[in-house]
Image (cartoon, rainbow, N blue to C red):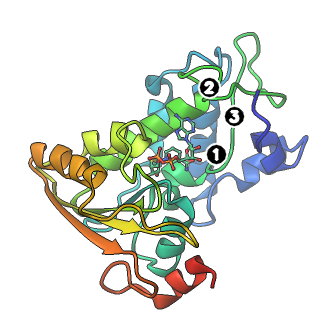
Amino acid sequence: MATSQSLSQAAGAPGRKRFFSTFCPPQVLDKDCQKIQEAFIKSFTSKDPCNVTEQDYQLFIELTNEIVPCDKTVFWSKTKELAHQYTEIQQEMFTLENTLLGYIVDGLRWCGDAGSSEINYKSCPDWREECFNNSVSVFWNAVSKRFAEDACGVVHVVLNGSLIKAFDEKSTFGRVEIRNLHPQKVHTLQAWVMHSIGGIASISCSSSSIFNLKTIINERNITFTCQDNYRRGTCMGAKCSMRTFAANEGA
Ligand code: ZNA
């Protein structure tokens, strides 16, 4: 069973009250927030935590209803920290976690129980070891799908060039996000291949892993472009700040 931070810990146990009041970012009106959090909790409570469906999260997804402007979507895979450092500086760019869909439970685990209408504050199944259709994995699949379906213009992805598989077809990005881009709306996928602190620069835009991504994207009638940023101080995107990479490289 999972030991990472649970909803109850995030709220401060017993915490249900605090959980409710801290669930949404300040710009979301209280009454909308209340509805959204109720829909979220109903998605997985009273259910077997290993048998949740994407359909279960649909009402929650419909209620969040947030639009990211064209050209401003940022996906990431094995680069969570770097991608978020980037959108922190480039405030007009959005990862899933910068939108309401992903913001509210990012970094948390949650589940219910078939025999109770309460949130299970004790333990939840681990997605790697116990079951695939658990409340957390199904949630990320469902919201990642929606985030990708809504994208338009140029979309960006931050990939980890210090891993052998900078692009992993089994990742959420590979399985869900690229498969749900609409070619009628998205004309280009721009990949940024980044190398992490002290890591080896094993993968570049010309490597086979990236070529595999290019092939899948081109088959979907979307243009693929790729930019290597392996050198210290190189910028990500046209307007990026050098501070992003100074911080990431950590000296
Ligand atoms: N914020 C998240 O925790 C999260 C976000 C989890 C899964 C997916 N996403 C979306 S998809 C995000 O906005 C990115 O655009 C995409 C990143 O997903 P990825 O390509 O699978 O990248 P990753 O680095 O392998 O995984 C991201 C995080 O999710 C890591 O902490 C993983 O341990 C965790 N994770 C990956 N797959 C699952 C998972 N957690 C639960 N169930 C899974 N099947």
Residue occupying the point 75% across, 10% down: 115
Residue occupying the point 59% across, 24% down: 134
Task: Indicate the quadrant containing the C terminus: top left, top right, bottom left or bottom right.
Answer: bottom right
As displayed, is residue 221 above or below residue 126? below
Mark 3, secondary structure of its residue: loop
Q: Amino acid at mark 2?
A: Phe
Q: Earlier in the sequence, mark 2 or mark 1?
A: 1
Mark in the foreground, 2 or 1: 2
Q: Earlier in the sequence, mark 2 or mark 3?
A: 2
Residue occupying the point 62% across, 25% down: 44
Quarter of image, res 73:
bottom left
Task: Indicate the quadrant containing the N terminus: top left, top right, bottom left or bottom right.
Answer: top right
The front one of 17 and 72 is: 72
Q: Amino acid at mark 3?
A: Trp
Q: Are marks 2 and 3 in contact (CB under 8 Å)?
A: yes
Give x and y (percent) for residue 56.
50, 24
Specify the label residue 44 is tagged with: 2
Mark in the foreground, 2 or 3: 3
Q: Amino acid at mark 1?
A: Gln
Specify the label residue 110 is tagged with: 3
The CA distance from mark 3 to mark 1 is 18 Å
Specify the label residue 34 is tagged with: 1
